[in-house]
Image: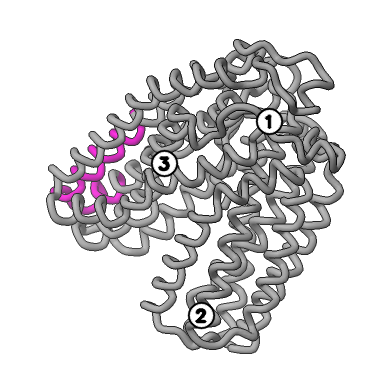
Amino acid sequence: MSLGLTSLATRFRAPSPLAGRLARQSLLFALGEGTFMTGSAVFFTQIVGLTAAQVGLGLTIAGVAAFLAAVPAGRLVDRFGPKLMWSLSALGHAAGFAMWPFITGFRGYVIMACVMQVVGSLGGASHAAYTIDVLPPDERVKSRAYMYSALNVGFTLGSMLGGIALAFHSNEVLRALPWATTAAFLGNAIAIRRLPNAPHDDRTPAERTVKLPGPGPLKNPGWLLTTFFGGVLWTNQVLLNVVIPLWLVEKTDAPRVLLAFLFGTNTVMCIFLPMAAARGIRDVTTALKAIRVSTTFFVISCLITLATHDTVGWITIALVWLGHVTVTGAELYLSAASWSFEAELMDPRRRGEYAGAAELSGTLGKVWAPAVYTFLAMTWGAAGWLVIAAIGVFAAAALHPSTALAGRFLRQHGPGVPSDDPLDQQAPPVPAPSMLEDPPLSTSGDGYGPPTARQRP
């Protein structure tokens, strides 16, 4: 028994002390976010006094604000350093959540929602730039997978806390919910400030004003296409959270209580399986292999789910559950591949800006999916599911030439070319081919290979 527990502890040990600290930060972030998200619908309708339609409209407006702020936020990250911007984002989140109990009416809700989304956009760009900047190349994917697991643990615990708050059926408890989230985000900001500086955090004021040579990510068609098609593949989350649940309720004889079991299964898989899914992913080539595996799971999920329209009883239950398991497999392998694309295809001097551009094009790749996929599945039935599967296959196939185009752009304009960036002048430039071919991940030590993780807001 003790040997088994030791083996289990070894298997889920952090890949490095820094990865462990980053995982604890991910858990704090998700704990706060998950706590508020669980009770947000009730909070906005009962405390702020909004209708459901106003909540949805406000979130849409805030989403547009975050979309427009993505690239400027990334430039701020590159200018002032990822850790500083990341900690400021966490503080901004804490202040924003503390303000929610004092917001009344639709106008105040929209303003606050926009502020929170823009702050979140800054945090997302900062987090992506920091983790890639500070982690050694052979640990990036493995560490991101470990952080992804911690993120899902945090969301699970946060959902439990939010559910406990809702169980009191008290408006006073609901008003305190944002302050509990504020405490978590203050802890998150402190945890971030205690992390080691990334290289771009240590630049002097003079170095920060140096203009980088060459074109930015908005002029890199390969990067924009890669993140766009990655966004299309991330529509697996629309199947997971929207289309399959609607299909279960309206098109099958499965009991609605099965939905709780489905989401529970997804959560457990995203806690325990990211590192297994990421094993062996170390560069663009192996990431594209993971994309093919992810797309295979995506297609299988579509085929299984469409078959449940004509099944009955326990067969329907089993197939719906299997469809959810396979679409979660698509999520896990896509996560691992996405981390590798970020690490290999971003210009290391412009990681914040590249992360912002990725948010921009990735959003365009998936924003249409809820309406389109719901229409296809619910109106066209089996034919609609086949079209959804074909969309996934097309996006996966298109990623192969787009990543090659992004790699060529990086070799032509990346750190292998003359640069005025003081960081590049302090050390010999990295040969261009190494941007696409990091050393293989070590298979010794902890016994598991590269990582995967859930997408962070």
The image quadrant that residue 440 belongs to is top right
Residue at the spot x=14%, y=49% of the render? 381
Question: Is residue 35 visible in this depiction of the protein?
Answer: yes
In the drawing, does residue 319 fall left or right of residue 454? left
Pointer 2 residue:
44
Indicate the secondary structure of the residue bearing disc 3.
helix
Disc with the residue nearer the chain's start (3 vs 2)? 2
Q: Nearer the viewer, mark 2 or mark 1?
A: 1
Indicate the secondary structure of the residue bearing disc 1.
loop
Q: Which disc number belongs to residue 400?
A: none
Q: Is residue 294 above or below residue 243?
A: above
Q: Does the CB distance between marks 3 and 2 fall below 8 Å?
A: no
| Chief SS of the magenta region | helix
In the foreground, 58 or 147: 58
The stretch of residues the image draws in magenta is 296-318
Q: Is residue 445 above or below residue 318?
A: above
Q: CA distance from mark 3 to mark 1?
A: 24 Å
User: Magenta segment: does it hold 158?
Assistant: no
Q: Residues within 10 Å of mark 3 (few under 14, many from 20)?
A: many
Q: Nearer the viewer, mark 3 or mark 1?
A: 1
The image quadrant that residue 419 belongs to is top right
Q: Residues within 10 Å of mark 2 (few under 14, many from 20)?
A: many
